[in-house]
Amino acid sequence: MCILGPSGSGKSTLLRCINFLEAPDEGEVFLRGERIGFKGAVPQKERDLGATRARMGMVFQHFNLWPHLTVLGNVIESPVHVLRKSREQTVEKAKELLTMVGVADKMHVYPHTLSGGQKQRVAIARALAMEPEVLLFDEPTSALDPEIVGEVLAVMRQLVNDGRTMIVVTHEMAFARDAGDTIVFMDAGAIVETAPPEEFFTRPRTERAQQFLQRYMR
């Protein structure tokens, strides 16, 4: 699912409400049919919050890597300390994930030595290491130089092809059209339109969506 809309329309806020980085004022959150949160509340018990977030991997706009840990350390930190997995198994899994996203040669360096595209690919590997049921991407390419946006989108396309469940806040129209199953269009804090990509990009139903596409699809 790709969430589109102008800046300030509430896309990132919606994503942050889904995994309770912000408590929603209205509505409910369900994961696999199970209600995990509701109006003004985090999951039923405060101690359940970490476990709930562990089911939803989050990839941030500005990477949010831990600067004092190596690339490998960033990827293994949460599985070892949150999921209580063995360090040996986690390291092997981390190496596989770093290879998959194309930064295995960087596993022993620190984040400050990486390019933006490399940092975001490490962030994706870190999210995958928790074996989440859904991946949440908050404008993962907006902080990147145009030349390296393709690096991150290639990894995301691979995840789509692997059948990963993903909710992506993005301004990358071509990615949304090609990779998305559903488009959600937001404006002024509300969902204005929901449609399959081909329908949304060729026959948007609302005037606001038509205006948006005229601007961004030039």
Image: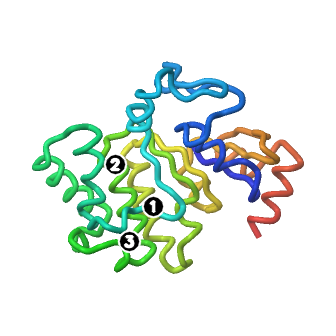
How many numbered callouts? 3
Q: Is residue 43 above or below residue 163?
A: above
Categorize mark 2 by other alpha carbons within 10 Å: few (<14), some (14-19), many (20+).
many
Of labels 1 and 3, earlier in sequence is 1
Residue type, mark 1 in image: Asn
Q: Of residues 78 and 173, which is closer to you in this image?
A: 78
Categorize mark 3 by other alpha carbons within 10 Å: few (<14), some (14-19), many (20+).
many
Q: Of residues 74 and 11, which is closer to you in this image?
A: 74
Query: Which residue is identified by label 1?
Result: 64
> Who's the residue at 59% across and 44% down the image?
15
Query: Which residue is identified by label 2?
Result: 128
Structural distance between the alpha carbons of marks 2 and 1 = 15 Å
> Who's the residue at 44% across and 56% down the image?
157
Q: Is residue 86 left or right of residue 175?
A: left
The numbered dot on residue 118 is 3
Label 2 sits on a secondary structure element that is: helix
